[in-house]
């Protein structure tokens, strides 16, 4: 939110918010507050920010039963002279000389190549149309012209899973299709999107066929649900993504890095109509799939910062083994909730060990947020007027963790001397109620209860074991619904709710019937994570381009609109994706500087961006998302200099020493970095640029500068 947004809100709105947080809001006031929130986007954002801040400032106003309190102690890492963010001395002068030229080349491609992204002032990707720089107009965030001109394709009916029903238009070295330049089908009259999903629900509830449980049947249901919403809203979906766009996207989403140049060449040359389906099966069985999802869930469960109370390596080992076996998600959740033992011998214990400080209040809130998709932090202090979780429900949920304590376990060497200490989860055999205090100072008691189901509160009952069972009971538990929503968000850049972990009656999903159906099918599949990914990636919507026309340019959740998924929303690479993609594109991991374990080196590199806050919520922030930080990293860091190395075994070393024609080298350079072939204008500009660079300095320098320009383009760092 901006200060201007806040200043435009009524003072009464903030008076009502204050009354709500002080537990003195009456029914008429609650109705007025509800009208403010429902009618005004700025009010909704201010409401969420206000309650989030209120919850942060009041973590310690309520207390549970007795328990250990281990505060995380992680000091922010300060930059040193050896940090990757410092400019590399060996390219300092040359970097200054070529910077203007590279930026000019990139700018030229941005407006003329038709395939390059152009960031706007809001740091939201804006896409440029082909050959018409003068026609580009300022837009709001994400409201822009298409990234390139794409050939109109025959699209299968929405009731069928998306397979290639005709051979894809092959691209020549100039970037044109067999039938000539691409052309994006855009309508002349933009349609207005509804502010809610009511029309979509009405349409989809009556027209969608029932799935038969097969992959094709479930994909067909996804297609029909979404197509019904497009029809009601009068929206034409984006065209199907061409092979380069889809290949790059599915690699980043499934295995966490861009495809190698050899893989891209093989896939783009393949004429098999089912090649996308076959590639997806290959990726789901790739070791990189295991590694990628281990990283994703490690970051969600314990964050990126280091802590003495957790053993990151042991947690990652547990996750790797689980994803390698395609272990059912409900079993993994049950392990995280009920785990006992030391953090090095039972990796699953590290989730709760990271959050059990402050009477397990953070553990309560974060468990609900990650596994149930519910933000209940504020309800520790007071009832939420719109959330279905109330203060009593928060402390009933918290009561399941009150038997848990954190202990220190001594580790001895062979001589019997203490070598180290390990954190461990142990169960205290205590029973009875949990006490909490209301905002009015009244002490209340509650007992362990989840979703209306109570358990025996005797000391002999293992409460966390019982909670693990309750959380995964039924045909559509919250655990399944939350997981489906989170994975959908991962692939589309937006979930059925925004934010993805704040579900409930106060924040209804954009496609409730579809979410409900997928959650039930996910449970029926045995909580099969790979099957869920397969359904999503084979859907018609995921096959669509991120480019958009006038008809669906307003399908933009960033503006507060309900997502229609008529296109795939653009998102930035994570720090891990960028690091791994740099290595894949350049072969930087094959240089003499790349010594030691890859995961360890990447984690050490990431620590420069991570800052842990000494709060009871165990918060952390990552500055990598900052456009300035990322730009400086890509331009000047040691990692970039390593990526541009011509040492033996790297991509540039092979390229420079190759006897291929100059045009072929440029094609391979573009394919290695952007997973596509260059356009004619791009090829012409780069040939001149490389030739001038080689003439002014040395032959490798021209190619290094060309790769530097590609790596510093927004097209490289975005998932589209």
Image (cartoon, helix red, strand yellow):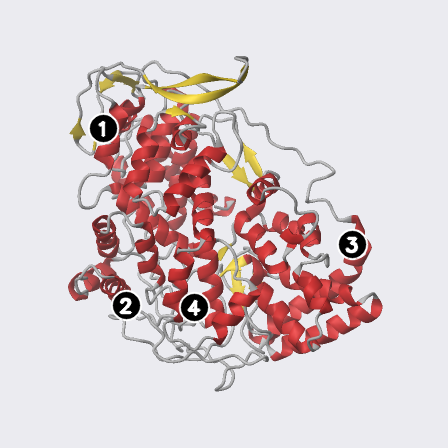
Q: List the single residue furthest toward the right.
A: 696
Category of crowding for the residue at label 4, using alpha-carbon neighbours closer than 10 angstroms: few (below 14), some (14–19), many (at least 20): many
Image position, residue 586 (x, y; %): 63, 59
Q: CA separation, marks 3 and 1?
A: 60 Å
Query: Residue 259 vs residue 111: left or right?
Result: left
Query: Residue 593 vs residue 467: left or right?
Result: right
Q: Nearer the viewer, mark 1 or mark 4?
A: 1
SS for callout 3: helix
Category of crowding for the residue at label 1, using alpha-carbon neighbours closer than 10 angstroms: few (below 14), some (14–19), many (at least 20): many
The residue labelled by disc 1 is 466
Q: CA separation, marks 2 and 3?
A: 52 Å
Q: CA separation, marks 1 and 4?
A: 45 Å
Q: Nearer the viewer, mark 4 or mark 3?
A: 3
Labels 4 & 3 near each other (Cβ < 8 A) = no
Visible residue check, residue 617: yes
Q: Compare marks 2 and 3 and give the one earlier in the sequence.
A: 3
Category of crowding for the residue at label 2, using alpha-carbon neighbours closer than 10 angstroms: few (below 14), some (14–19), many (at least 20): many
Residue in the image at 82% along x and 55% along y: 93
SS for callout 1: helix
Q: CA separation, marks 4 and 3?
A: 38 Å
Q: Which mark is residue 545?
A: 4
SS for callout 4: loop
Q: Compare marks 1 and 4 and give the one earlier in the sequence.
A: 1
Query: Residue 610 vs residue 348: left or right?
Result: right
The residue labelled by disc 3 is 91
Q: Compare marks 4 and 3 and give the one earlier in the sequence.
A: 3
Image position, residue 667 (x, y; %): 62, 73
Category of crowding for the residue at label 3, using alpha-carbon neighbours closer than 10 angstroms: few (below 14), some (14–19), many (at least 20): few
Q: Compare marks 3 and 1 and give the one earlier in the sequence.
A: 3
The residue labelled by disc 2 is 227
Q: Compare marks 2 and 4 and give the one earlier in the sequence.
A: 2
Labels 2 & 3 near each other (Cβ < 8 A) = no
């Amino acid at each position: 939110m901006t200060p201007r947004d806040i200043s435009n809100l009524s003072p009464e709105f903030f008076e009502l918010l204050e009354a709500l947080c002080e537990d003195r809001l009456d029914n008429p006031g609650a109705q007025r507050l509800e009208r403010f929130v429902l009618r005004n986007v700025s009010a909704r954002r201010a409401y969420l920010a206000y309650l989030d801040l209120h919850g942060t400032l009041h973590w310690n106003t309520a207390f549970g039963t007795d328990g250990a309190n281990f505060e995380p102690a992680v000091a922010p890492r300060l930059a040193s002279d050896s940090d990757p963010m410092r400019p590399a001395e060996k390219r300092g002068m040359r970097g200054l000389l070529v910077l203007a030229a590279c930026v000019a080349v990139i700018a030229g491609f941005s407006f003329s190549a038709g395939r390059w992204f152009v960031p706007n002032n809001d740091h939201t990707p804006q896409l440029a149309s082909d050959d018409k720089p003068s026609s580009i107009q300022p837009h709001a965030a994400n409201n822009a012209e298409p990234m390139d001109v794409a050939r109109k394709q025959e699209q299968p009916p929405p009731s069928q899973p998306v397979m290639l029903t005709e051979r894809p238009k092959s691209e020549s070295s100039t970037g044109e299709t067999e039938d000539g330049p691409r052309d994006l089908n855009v309508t002349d009259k933009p349609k207005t999107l509804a502010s809610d999903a009511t029309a979509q629900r009405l349409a989809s509830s009556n027209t969608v066929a029932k799935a038969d449980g097969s992959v094709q049947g479930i994909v067909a249901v996804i297609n029909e649900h979404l197509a019904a919403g497009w029809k009601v809203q009068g929206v034409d979906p984006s065209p199907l993504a061409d092979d380069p766009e889809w290949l790059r996207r599915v690699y980043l989403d499934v295995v966490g890095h861009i495809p190698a140049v050899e893989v891209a060449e093989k896939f783009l040359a393949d004429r098999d109509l089912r090649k996308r389906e076959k590639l997806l099966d290959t990726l789901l069985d790739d070791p990189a799939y295991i590694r990628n999802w281990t990283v994703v869930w490690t970051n969600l469960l314990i964050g990126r910062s280091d802590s003495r109370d957790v053993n990151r390596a042991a947690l990652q080992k547990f996750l790797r083994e689980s994803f390698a076996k395609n272990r059912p998600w409900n079993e993994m959740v049950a392990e995280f909730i009920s785990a006992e033992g030391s953090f090095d011998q039972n990796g699953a214990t590290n989730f709760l060990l990271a959050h059990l400080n402050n009477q397990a209040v953070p553990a309560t809130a974060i468990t609900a947020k990650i596994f149930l998709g519910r933000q209940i932090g504020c309800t520790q202090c007071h009832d939420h007027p719109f959330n279905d979780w109330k203060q009593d429900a928060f402390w009933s949920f918290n009561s399941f963790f009150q038997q848990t304590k954190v202990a220190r376990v001594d580790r001895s060497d062979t001589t019997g001397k203490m070598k180290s200490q390990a954190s461990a989860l142990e169960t205290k055999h205590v029973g009875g109620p949990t006490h909490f205090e209301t905002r009015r100072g009244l002490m209340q008691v509650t007992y362990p209860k989840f979703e209306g189901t109570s358990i025996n509160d005797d000391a002999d009952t293992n409460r966390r074991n019982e909670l693990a069972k309750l959380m995964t009971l039924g045909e559509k538990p919250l655990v399944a619904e939350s997981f489906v929503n989170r994975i959908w968000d991962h692939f589309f850049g937006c979930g059925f709710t925004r934010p993805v972990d704040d579900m409930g009656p106060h924040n209804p999903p954009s496609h409730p019937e579809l979410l409900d159906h997928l959650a039930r099918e996910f449970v029926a599949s045995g909580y099969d994570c790979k099957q869920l990914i397969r359904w999503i990636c084979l859907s018609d919507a995921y096959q669509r381009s991120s480019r958009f026309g006038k008809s669906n340019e307003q399908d933009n959740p960033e503006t507060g609109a309900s997502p229609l998924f008529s296109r795939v929303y653009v998102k930035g690479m994570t720090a891990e994706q960028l690091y791994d993609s740099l290595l894949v594109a350049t072969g930087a991991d094959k240089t003499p500087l790349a010594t030691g374990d890859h995961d360890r080196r990447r984690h050490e590199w990431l620590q420069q961006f991570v800052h842990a806050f000494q709060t009871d919520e165990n918060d952390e922030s990552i500055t990598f998302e900052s456009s300035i930080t990322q730009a400086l990293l890509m331009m000047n860091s040691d990692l970039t200099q390593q990526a541009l190395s011509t040492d033996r075994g790297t991509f540039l070393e092979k390229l420079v020493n190759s006897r291929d024609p100059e045009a072929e080298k440029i094609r391979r350079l573009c394919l290695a970095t952007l997973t596509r072939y260059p356009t004619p204008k791009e090829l012409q500009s780069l040939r001149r640029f490389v030739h001038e660079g080689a003439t002014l300095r040395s032959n490798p320098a021209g190619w290094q500068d060309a790769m530097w320009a590609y790596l510093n383009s927004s097209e490289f760092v975005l998932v589209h």
